Amino acid sequence: MAKACGYCSIGLKFSNTPLFGGGRLATGETLCRACRLKLKNVSPALKLRKLTLDDATERLEQMAVKRAVVNVAGQLEKLAGLKEKGLLTQEEFDAQKKKMYRQCFLP
Ligand SMILES: [Zn+2]
């Protein structure tokens, strides 16, 4: 039976090997390697076995939101630079900004 990551639902081929598989959660679900690494990057001492799927989901979602906000902030700075140089009008800048905010808060 093929297993899937409890968070992103990607199929797991080698769920039992430390290299390719993810970690197992307290509630029995398995995370893929990418999701496990994302969690480890933020909390290196984190023990997956002590997390429930809800805990892991919450942490991964907080990270995704933070990353999206950082991306948008960087893009806004670039746009502001273009506006200062006169390459974008205020209206164009506002329209782009609105578009980015919408993307940021979509799943
Ligand atoms: Zn995953």
Image (cartoon, helix red, strand yellow):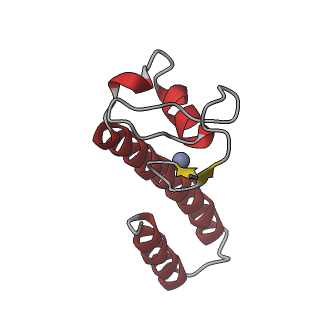
Q: Residue furthest front?
A: 1
Residue 106: horizontal and vertical position, in percent? 40, 69
Residues 3 and 21: in front is 3
Residues 57 and 101: in front is 57
Taking the image as shown, residue 52 lies to the left or right of residue 40, namely left
Query: Residue 75: which quarter of the image?
Result: bottom right
Residue shown at 57% from the left, 42% from the top? 32
Location of residue 76 with respect to 17 vertically, above or below: below
Location of residue 71 with respect to 41 vertically, above or below: below
Residue shown at 46% from the left, 15% from the top? 45
Location of residue 71 with respect to 100 vertically, above or below: above
Residue 11: horizontal and vertical position, in percent? 60, 54
Query: Residue 22: which quarter of the image?
Result: top right
Residues 15 and 48: in front is 15
Query: Residue 35: which quarter of the image?
Result: top right
Taking the image as shown, residue 55 lies to the left or right of residue 9, namely left
Q: Quadrant of the C terminus?
A: bottom left
Residues 80 and 22: in front is 22
Residue 81: horizontal and vertical position, in percent? 62, 62
Q: Residue furthest top?
A: 45
Q: How many marks?
A: 0
Residue 41: horizontal and vertical position, in percent? 55, 28
Residue shown at 41% from the left, 41% from the top? 29
